[in-house]
Image (spheres, grey):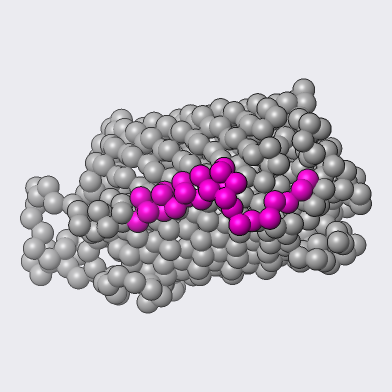
Amino acid sequence: MAFKSDMPPGQALMLAALALPGLGVGLGVPDAAAQTLPDSATLSVDYLHYKDEQPGLDRVSVRSPAVRLSLPVAGAWLLEAGAVSDHVSGATPRYHTAISGASRMDDQRHAADLRVTRYLANASVSAGAAWSNENDYRSRALSLGGTISSADHNTTGGLSLGVSNDTISPVNLLVTGERRHTVELQASLEQVLTQRDIVKLDLTHAKGKGYYSDPYKYVDKRPRKRDVNGLLLRWNHALADGSAVRTSYRYYMDSFGIRAHTLGAEYERALGGGWALTPSLRLSTQSAADFYFDPVYDKRFGPPFPPGYTFGSTAFTSADQRLSGFGAVTAGLQAAYSFGDGWRAHVKAEHYRQSTGWRQFGSGSPGLARMDAQIWQLGVSKQW
Amino acid sequence: MQAQWRTGSGLAKWAARAALCAAAGLAAGCTPLQPVAAWEKGALAQPNMRFDRDPAASRYSAHIYDSKEAASGAGSVGGGGCGCN
């Protein structure tokens, strides 16, 4: 077995030995082999940039500095914390792909999260909190979770509960102090299949109630209840040369009538000398929400009103492109360099394209312009 | 809509049952898998085999997709919401 990644020579063998029953408490291998406490701390600083556009039109640009810390404490605890600040500018459509002068925005979002995990011999318990503040949206979330592993740490089951409370107060005062409350339950199963393969299955059910309409979009009225079911299956495979293939599949469905399939694959190729290249591909397709309407408008009122629109009606309706049926492809490439002594730097570039013509199932949603986005990530981390 | 939702819910229940059966089978030792010993997990211990290889980048990507697509989540809970979606 040859290892050429950023783990120091011999450490993999030592970590494997530490994972022996009776010796692995408080130490152990990184998370892929079992739910065990990392043996080292990691601090990472990232700068993230996002920009999207439609033919002939620049839309939203986001710049986000972010910092994350993972810190083992006292041989049995893990503290994880992160903070990010998003600066968003540009314009988003008011209906379908139409952007008006009122669509311009300049917003700042600050978010942070904290998680504490207590590791036991074959189990772990964790609690977390998350905050997110914008001038028109505030979110507070709490979570509790636990895992239990088989004696050989080849099988790990987990259960997590999350609750979040959001407050929406748009600057156009369409509504004030609206609330959204969500409860999420997740069950997970992680299994070592072979010496080179590990899989993880996550099943999530979420129940939400409250304000789901978009206050900045015209004729947007959505149900005040949204239930979500999600299935995420991930499969990682280690190659003999120290490279790895990470694949995933997600199925999503919600009570708005949206169904989505998402496939992801990454190939982290160890090049030697501390370098690694990771090409990645993501394919996604979703069906439209039951109340999404195509860009065909009422003959009397014109845009943005759907055919047969009645003022004061309580019927659900939305012209939000994100609720339409479409397909999307993301292609990316990451280059990473490990300096030694725990330092690692990486740069990642991705291109995202969303097109209604690429939807793989469902009907409708013609007539929307495609959307393209460029995503850049630049980061450096230190492990000690 | 209700009919479709019931169909989808059925799939979720099927998946949940499948996961439960797999877990029960593994717990009962009925798995056809050959157990991997601790000293055979060197390849699995590599950082590039983590499900969350780069937590900051993963969160950022998830945030972007949450804001541009209707489907979101499934990998974790308790992350909270944002005005972007």
Residue located farthest toward the bottom when viewing the structure as drawn: A357
Q: Quadrant of the C terminus of chain A?
A: top right
A35 lies above or below A320? above
Of residue A16 and residue A162, the one placed in the foreground of this image is A16
Asked if the magenta segment contains residue B20, the reply would be yes
Residue B72 in the image, given as x and y percentages of width and height: 44, 52
Asked if the magenta segment contains residue A238, the reply would be no
Q: Quadrant of the N terminus of chain A?
A: bottom right
Describe residue A204's horizontal placement relative to residue A209 as left or right.
Answer: right
Measuring 9% from the left and 50% from the top, which residue is drawn there?
Answer: A313
A304 lies above or below A56? above
Residue A140 in the image, given as x and y percentages of width and height: 45, 30
Visible in this render: residue A122? yes
Measuring 88% from the left and 52% from the top, which residue is drawn there?
Answer: A339
**Start and end of the magenta stretch?**
B11-38
* Dominant secondary-structure state across the stretch colored magenta: helix
Quadrant of res A151: top right
